[in-house]
Image (cartoon, grey):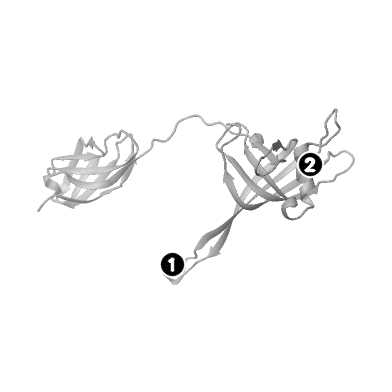
Amino acid sequence: MAIAISGITPATGPLSGGTVHYITGTSLDTVTGITIKGTAVAQYSALSPTLIRLTLPAGGTAGAGDVVLNPGAVTLAGGFTYSAAASTEQLVSTVARKWALDVNTGTVAAPVWTPVRAIGELKPTVDAQMEDDSDYDSNGWASEVKTQLKWALETKVFRKVGVASAAYDPGQEKLRQAADQFGAAGTVQVRWYDRTGGPEAYTGFASVSWEPEGGDAKDLDQVTIKLSGNGARTTITNPAA
């Protein structure tokens, strides 16, 4: 009977090698050589005509590759995947104040991106609408599918005025003025992004809610602004990159 390969278990392993794997097939006791993703296997033994035990050699690059048995170059195409080595790089925390928020005070055709200043908090969210799609085939297990996404921003700002002008921040004012309007007048275009230049950067159109916090004699004037997305949130090139 000719050599044949039906599988390798486990079908993934680390780039460093050294893990034990088993090849199943036929006439495996006649195998004279094995390569995995182009790397020769130095340690292997046929436990029976249908089973080979091997020690995985170190791989060159992560990804899928062929398992080849000789003689005859019998191939299991893409049968084994080297997994990327776990990173040992030191990690440091990022801070919540990384976010910047701009509002378009120009037009859609000719945007003028004006920063919203004096932000105390900013929370971006994306909520998923889930619908039940359970059926008889699941044997009593429930199932849900995502049918819609909805983005929003909630930010708290301090109401500050310019030392010389005594005017409120123009970015905040654009949002406040849109809050009690309807239609196009009540819709703003905003962008929010990682001010340190990271990969998170988005833009979209939103309706505005303006909610003063109030307070007693010792409290600062603070407002909660809620931006409810109208349509898609679009990923953009980070303007701070």
On screen, residue 43 above or below 78: above
Could you tell me which secondary element the residue under label 1 belongs to? helix
Residue farthest along the right direction in this orientation: 217
Q: 172 left or right of 231?
A: right
On screen, residue 115 above or below 229: above
Question: Which image quarter holds the C terminus?
Answer: top right
**Residues at marks 2 and 1, CA–CA distance in whole angstroms:** 53 Å
> In x, y percent, where is residue 140?
46, 69
On screen, residue 27 above or below 116: below
Pick whichever of labels 2 and 1 is earlier in the sequence.
1
Q: 19 left or right of 99?
A: left
- The residue tagged 1 is 138
Residue 175: which quarter of the image?
top right
Query: Which amino acid is tagged 1?
Result: Ser
Viewer-nearest residue: 222 or 234: 234
Q: 124 left or right of 33?
A: right
Q: Nearer the viewer, mark 2 or mark 1?
A: 2
Q: 179 left or right of 111?
A: right
Could you tell me which secondary element the residue under label 2 belongs to? helix
Q: Mark 1 and mark 2 in contact (Cβ < 8 Å)?
A: no
Mark 1 surroundings: few (<14), some (14-19) or many (≥20) residues within 10 A: few
Mark 2 surroundings: few (<14), some (14-19) or many (≥20) residues within 10 A: some
Residue shown at the point (62%, 38%) measured from the top left: 193
> In x, y percent, where is residue 151?
62, 51
- The residue tagged 2 is 173
Query: Which amino acid is tagged 2?
Result: Glu
Residue shown at the point (55%, 37%) measured from the top left: 199
> In x, y percent, where is residue 144?
51, 62
> In x, y percent, where is residue 97?
66, 35
